[in-house]
Amino acid sequence: MMTMKDIEQDDENAWLDRMQLHADPLVDNTIGEIIGAWSPPAVSPESGNVAASTSAWISALNPQWKKIDTVTKIFGDWTSNQNINAWQPAVGLIATIGRPLLKYVAANATLPDWADTAKIARAEELFMVRCGIRYVAALCEPAGVLRHS
């Protein structure tokens, strides 16, 4: 016989299972806009010519991989909130990568409605006490995303 606790646990497990498929729609849509459609080549591994098949896949998907590489490098340069807020795309990237990333940054400039600023402030305080200032000095910038008035 299932108890109420068993039913609650089943509900929680089902919710957690569903959450594994729930990502961040804003970032997913941003990266999807940047990368575009992935079109597999006409040659497949089942054709028997593995070298030609591999080469076809690499060639067909090379533009997407280059965009991923570029976005990864940009994210690597975003080492602080000030870097992100001041970032402007290079002229050649404005249409393909720049606009989507600028929209993403603008959409994340404020905390979501559900964010509890008191809990965030307390977590920052506990983090500072626990980890020490020398480890987190770079995170404590006046223009921080989490520091809204």
Image: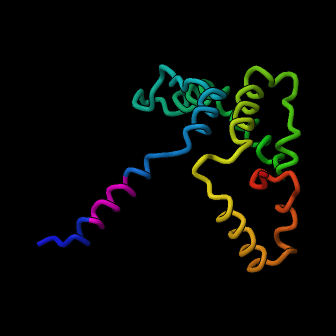
Q: Is residue 20 left or right of residue 26?
A: left
Q: Is residue 6 magenta?
A: no
Q: Is residue 38 left or right of residue 111?
A: left
Residue depicted at x 87% and y 28%: 90
Q: Position of residue 144 (x, y in %)?
A: 81, 53
Q: Number of callouts in the render? A: 0
Residue 36 or residue 19, whichever sits in front: 19
- Residue extent of the magenta highlight: 8-17
Q: Position of residue 115 (x, y in %)?
A: 62, 54
Q: Quadrant of residue 137?
A: bottom right
Above or below, 3 against 144 in this view is below
Q: Main secondary structure of the magenta part?
A: helix
Residue depicted at x 50% and y 25%: 40
Q: Quadrant of residue 63?
A: top right
Residue 47 or residue 76, whichever sits in front: 76
Above or below, 106 against 113 in this view is above
Above or below, 113 against 120 in this view is above
Q: Quadrant of residue 132?
A: bottom right
Q: Is residue 13 magenta?
A: yes
Q: Position of residue 130 (x, y in %)?
A: 74, 80
Residue depicted at x 63% and y 28%: 35
Residue 137 or residue 59, whichever sits in front: 137
Q: Give the position of the N terminus as an image quadrant.
A: bottom left
Residue depicted at x 82% and y 61%: 139
- Hey, which residue is sitting farthest left in the picture? 1
Model colouring:
rainbow
Q: Is residue 139 left or right of residue 106?
A: right
Q: Is residue 51 left or right of residue 144?
A: left
